[in-house]
Amino acid sequence: MAPAGLHAVAVRVLLLSLLAVSAIDVVSAATAAPLKFGINYGQIANNLPHPAQVSGLLQSLNVNRVKLYDADPAVLTAFAGTGVEFIVGNEDLQNLTDAGKARAWVAQHVQPFIPSTRITCITVGNEVLSGKDTVAMQNLLPAMQAMHQAVSDLGLAGQVNVSTAHSVNILASSYPPSSGVFREELAQYIQPILNFHAEVRSPFLINAYPFFAYKASPGSVSLPYVLFEPNPGVVDPNTNLTYDNMLYAQIDAVYAAMKAMGHTDLTVRISETGWPSKGDGDEVGATVANAAAYNGNLMKRIAMGQGTPLKPDVPIDVFVFALFNEDMKPGPASERNYGLFYPNGTPVYNLGFNGASFSPSPTFSSSSKPTTTFLMAVVVLLAGFFL
């Protein structure tokens, strides 16, 4: 028989081993690999769930990046402590050109929520250069500069960057991708904005919707090409690169347009892309099946860490539009039907989100939770007897 001292040591070793195994199991259950796409959380609706429920839903899906169009304090508070990374927005360009007002906005709407809520980017305006408001166009860069200065003055420069989201329509040409060029009349605005991004090291954000190209020309645009489904692809004659989907071609066209303005030092992020599940009678392609195919195939490619033909080693960085159908959005029916979910939390179509839940707590997998509970119980029981 082993001496009592050795017996006690052995028990302690066993307890430490069990505790280590249980701790690893807890960590693996709580930190399952997050989904690699972000999601746009729009709120132009009168029937959306409370932000606390939305926080539970996104945690159950393991989504850890969210883009807002404002800085809703109810949302930012609801996500405190979750580790979810936020892009927040402000479209009040006229006031933001005033350095004092920009600083006051950051001090009120961003700074108080950090670090409990992870805010990593502020977008100034949305698709300003593709609109018709020349005053807003002129105010865009000064507002971005004032916002960046405010972030720096408040000691947040290392955590929060500043950008703006552009429509892909700022391109005059996107085919072939290597011939991508920005619209000539916008060059006076885009060139200094690119210089700003390079100086402050913030991403260039693009909203790109292959749906619009298909809707406009369903007879000439290949549906499999825009839905990431098998197709012969399109070869860029200048680079011999083959593109099997329109979104990648659009991304590389933006890279080409930036290169034409002297910038190869910037990263393109897709701040919006998606496909509507319903539309008006003349909105060809707006169906549940096509929406499921577009977003489902896109998510598979994101999960693979896939890059574009031009940048194969740079995984695409995408925010899907949108989290919910938004019943108060103006315009054609498609505008109200981009959501992955109905406001009651049920999926619009199957993307593997059947485990989605409005539970306010993160969920554990059915296989890991009982094991963890059992091991912890063993540790406690043995500790009671021997320690």
Image (cartoon, rainbow, N blue to C red):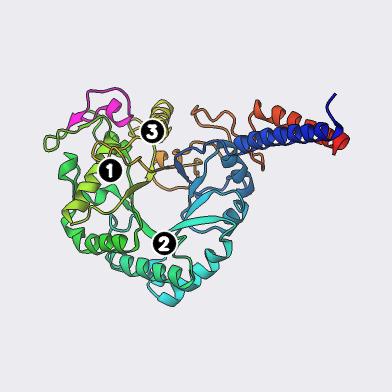
Of 160 and 175, nearer the camera is: 160
Would you identify the image quadrant in which residue 374 lies? top right
Residue topped by disc 3: 298
Disc 2: which residue: 91
Circle 2 crowding by C-alpha within 10 Å: few under 14, some 14–19, many from 20: some
Q: Which residue type carries mark 3?
A: Leu
Farthest bottom residue?
A: 100
Q: Nearer the viewer, mark 2 or mark 1?
A: 1
Q: Nearer the viewer, residue 169 or 312?
A: 312
Q: Quadrant of the N terminus?
A: top right
Q: Is residue 293 visible?
A: yes
Q: Residues within 10 Å of mark 3 (few under 14, many from 20)?
A: many
* Residue drawn where x is 55% and y is 38% of the image: 62
Marked residue nearer the N-terminal end (2 or 1): 2
| Magenta span main SS | loop
Q: Gap between marks 1 and 3, in whole Å?
A: 14 Å
Task: Point out residue 317 in the picture as x, y percentages from the top left corner.
Answer: 38, 43
Task: Name the disc covering residue 251, or none.
Answer: 1
State the separation of the CA atoms marked 3 and 2.
Answer: 29 Å
Per the rendered image, the range of residues in magenta is 220-235
In the image, residue 354 lies at what x, y percent? 57, 28
The quadrant the C terminus occupies is top right
What amino acid is labelled 2 in the image?
Answer: Glu
